[in-house]
Image (cartoon, rainbow, N blue to C red):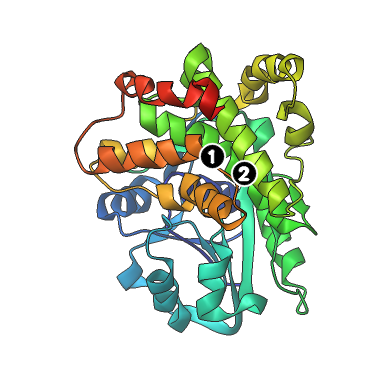
Amino acid sequence: MKIAVYGAGSIGTIMGAYITKAGQEIDLISIDEDHIAALKSTGAHVTGTVDFTVKVKAMLPQEMKGKYDLIFLVTKQLDNAKVVQGLVPFLEDEGVICTLQNGLPELSVSEVIGTERTFGCAVAWGATQLKAGVCELTSEPSSLTFNLGTFGSDQKGKLKVIADVLSLMGPVEIENNFIGARWVKLLINSAFSGLSAVFGTTYGGVVDNKKSRLCAQRIIKECIDVAAAASIKIEPIQGKDVVKLLNYKGKIKQKISFMIIPLAIKKHRLLKASMLQDLEKGKRCEIDAINGVVSAYGKKVNFPTPFNDKVVEIIKKIEDGICRPSWDNLPMFDELFSDKKR
């Protein structure tokens, strides 16, 4: 098989490094010229909770040749239709795209290549690009898992093919209820990536501050309630039933949920949201594909999502230069904790 990672930033580079190290040839493709130059000259250096360097096959999009059987899509979900249309000439007739993007990107991908060629994967670990050629794994190695699935059918048996490739890095769970698997990752990203970007901190920083942890708890609750209203069954992640652990109705369960949250993200404390990394570089981020999706679903099922809405609002202000990622943004949530808005 001819395989590629398109959008080899932190996640894509680390995934490609692991797969290459396991003996499977895979092309790492990125528009970042400095990063590609470093990968070509010195290989991919994976640091953080692990440390290894491996020689990889890297290239710029304009250097792509031939057609691929499988392309892992790991770009930011800002202009998916245009990106996927650009990849169509490089796909074999039965070639498929597996998106590892955040949110629910399968719809925009399938609108270009069809549901039968569109597969999705929820990644349960995080990474940060430190500099050209060097990416930090910010989650524990034991968390290197994948939840794989499709919103369509798998008549060609492609799920097993994709799973075999990903399993070269870590355990793969093929999900029958893939939207439920996507939703649990959306819940985590909305609570921790969204607030990491708002406050300019790591996942650990979000939970260490009691007030921001309360914000995370409310975001999680909104995600659970909206999913229930939309008849979406949220799947467990890495063996943990998030709904059972973190959902609440009464005050006692709410306090227990609050205490559990730091334990739930213990393996990912060092993770710095990719949205925050984008904002720090002066780039727009994919907030509309994360907290924005929860807000959109909330409107669809007529369920209020004030905390997710507020995260989107603050991120938009940061993008427009009105404020910056900082703890100075924490008071913006104060009005949401009033009795009338609980």
Indicate the quadrant containing the N terminus: top left, top right, bottom left or bottom right. bottom right
Visible residue check, residue 49: no
Number of labels in the image equals 2
Residue 168, percent from left and from top = 68, 51
In the rendered structure, which amino acid carries the disc numbered 1? Asn
**Does 235 sit above or below residue 143?**
below
Residue at image position (51%, 69%) is: 108
Residue at image position (20%, 35%) is: 322
Closest to the observer, 152 or 129: 152
Q: Given the current orientation, which residue lies at the most extreme left position?
A: 321
Closest to the observer, 124 or 220: 220
Indicate the quadrant where residue 155 lies.
bottom right
Callout 1 secondary element: helix
Q: Mark 1 = which residue? A: 189
Q: Mark 2 = which residue? A: 185
Residue 207, percent from left and from top = 53, 18
Report, in whole angstroms, how far the alpha carbon at label 2 lies from the one at label 1: 6 Å
Residue 221, percent from left and from top = 64, 33
Category of crowding for the residue at label 2, using alpha-carbon neighbours closer than 10 angstroms: few (below 14), some (14–19), many (at least 20) = many
Closest to the observer, 59 or 111: 111
**Does 332 sit above or below residue 255?**
below
**Does 33 sit above or below residue 247?**
below
Side (left or right) of 330 relative to 111: left
Residue at image position (49%, 21%) is: 338
Side (left or right) of 261 relative to 250: left
Indicate the quadrant where residue 86 lies.
bottom left
Residues at marks 2 and 1 touching, judged by CB atoms closer than 8 Å:
yes
Residue 204, percent from left and from top = 51, 20
Closest to the observer, 128 or 338: 338
Callout 2 secondary element: helix
